[in-house]
Image: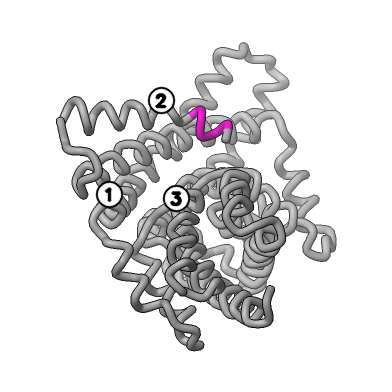
Amino acid sequence: MIIMDIFQPIQIFADWVVYQLFLLPPKTHLAESLNFFIYDSIKIFLLLVVINYLMAAVRYYLPTEKIRDFLTKRNWYGLDYLLASFFGVITPFCSCSSIPLFVGFLSAGIPLGVTLAFLITSPLVNEASIAIFAGIFGLKITFLYILAGVAVGIVGGFVLNKMKLDEEIDEAIKKVIKQSKDIKKGYLKLKEEKFKLNILLKRFWKEGWDITKKIFFYVLIGVGIGSVIHGFVPMGFFEKYLANSSLWSVPLAVILAIPLYSNAVGVIPIMQVLVSKGVPFGTALAFMMATVGLSLPEALILKKVMKKKLLISFFAVVTIGIILIGWLFNILNAVKM
């Protein structure tokens, strides 16, 4: 909730632009789309700048090579994936907002599978969505929802790591990672030479800004598509296709959710409506998870970070995980979960 308070001025600004500057009528398709675009574009831009700047500082002050070796040269029995997924739970970002942290982790030398565990979990579960979920569905189902989101992240990251896709990172990002390693070596020399703080701050800014510039154009494209879908696609369209308990209702829910774009907080009330309309709980949960974890805007942004093979593998693993979760919850619901 604190994060939401931090971003509240952005929402106020978006409201002012849409409703006072452009004088658009509230609750219209155009107003909702434009408001969404302004809010998410500014929010993600600020996240990119801040996170990439902080990651530049991390590379200077922390022994990232030792951390990387610590994570890769020991048999953690999955604990590293659990920690990454837990970090995803406590970072209240949507799928697009999580990508800057994902890039930052890669540039810091954190293993790909571990960073993917974070990227999968972060949009699916966060403290705000947990609070809303508990208020609507109760503590027992909320606990199972948290376990499901963390499980998808852990297993997905582990499976993708076993597929040996480390070279499937976009060449531009590889270059940034290599530059980060070179910069790290330069930082060690800077430490010895005891450069002034203002010089370090300028270097941190340059490195973070370089990464931000490479990604933000694709963020705008992704958010733009998401804003159109957010404002113009009627949710009632989806309800009539999902209110049955057939085996194919869960995969269909996932497919129908992919073009949409929202965070977990925004889609949980929609999930509540679907359940009240007779949609099985697991089907509605799969729809919610797919909306926040498999969105088309996320794919467009990740396309700048991942090569085609990794991108397809990432979405395939997450899709399978969400479908399995949906089926499992439908079974549990059938036996009075």
Q: Is residue 171 visible?
A: no
The majority secondary structure of the magenta stretch comes to helix
**SS category of the residue bearing label 2:** helix
How packed mark 2 is, by other alpha carbons closer than 10 Å (few <14, some 14-19, many 20 or more), is few
Please tell me which residue is depicted at 29% across the width and 69% down the height of the picture.
237
Residue 74 appears left or right of 233: right
Q: Do labels 3 and 1 touch, CB within 8 Å?
A: no
Q: Position of residue 243 (x, y in %)?
A: 42, 78
The residue mark sitting in front, 3 or 1, is 3
Q: Is residue 6 visible?
A: yes
Q: For the point 18% across and 26% down, which residue is it?
A: 21
First reached walking from the N terminus: tag 2 or tag 3: 2
Earlier residue among tags 2 and 1: 2
Q: Position of residue 136 (x, y in %)?
A: 57, 54
- The residue that mark 2 highlights is 9
Which residue is at the front of the view, 290 or 107?
290
Secondary element type, mark 3: helix
The residue to which callout 1 is attached is: 224
- Residue 223: image location, x then y, percent: 33, 48
| Front tag of 2 and 1 | 2
Residue beneath label 3, please? 266
Label 2 and label 1: CA atoms lie apart by: 21 Å
Is residue 34 depicted above or below 232 in this figure? above
Q: From which residue to which does the magenta span run? A: 2-6
Q: Amino acid at mark 1?
A: Gly
What secondary structure is marked by label 1?
Answer: helix
Magenta span includes 4 = yes
Q: Residue at x 63, y 62 (%)?
A: 149
Q: Check whether the beta carbons of the residues at disc 2 and disc 1 lie within 8 A of each other.
A: no
